[in-house]
Image: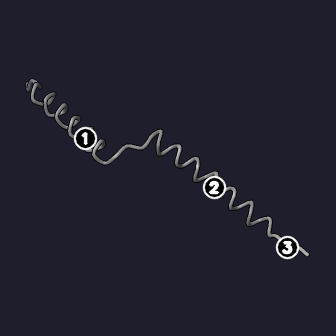
Amino acid sequence: MAKPVNLNRFRKEKARAEKKARADQNAVKFGRTKDQKDLDKAAKRITIDRLDGHKIDD
């Protein structure tokens, strides 16, 4: 005779697998490396400093 199967466990495992797959897709779609983030921060900082240097004080 076959061993009884817990359907809740299979349902939860399937939900976890789907959630992980969606997370992996989002990581590829939206994720950036730390180097890319640091490069963007540095570029933004340079731009802000340049603009602040051109301000006219009254």
Task: Look at the numbered discs 1 and 2 and tell me whether their residues touch, using CB distance below 8 Å.
Answer: no
Measured along the vertical axis of the image, is residue 21 above or below residue 2?
above
Identify residue for label 2. 17
Q: Residues within 10 Å of mark 3 (few under 14, many from 20)?
A: few
Mark 1 element type? helix
How far from the left and from the top, in percent, is residue 46? 16, 34
Identify residue for label 1. 41
How was the colour assigned to the protein in this rendering? Answer: one colour
Q: Residue at x 54, y 49 (%)?
A: 23
Residue type at the position of mark 2: Ala
Give the residue at the far front of this rendering.
Answer: 1
Question: Which numbered marker is on residue 29?
Answer: none
Measured along the vertical axis of the image, is residue 1 above or below residue 54?
below
Residue type at the position of mark 1: Lys
- 3 or 2: tag closer to the N-terminus: 3
Question: Which numbered marker is on residue 4?
Answer: 3
Mark 2 element type? helix
How far from the left and from the top, in percent, is residue 39? 24, 40
Q: Residues within 10 Å of mark 1 (few under 14, many from 20)?
A: few
Q: CA distance from mark 1 to mark 3?
A: 56 Å
- Residue 27 vs residue 53, the one in the foreground: 27
Q: In the displayed structure, does residue 31 sit left or right of residue 54? A: right
Measured along the vertical axis of the image, is residue 50 above or below residue 14?
above
- 1 or 3: tag closer to the N-terminus: 3
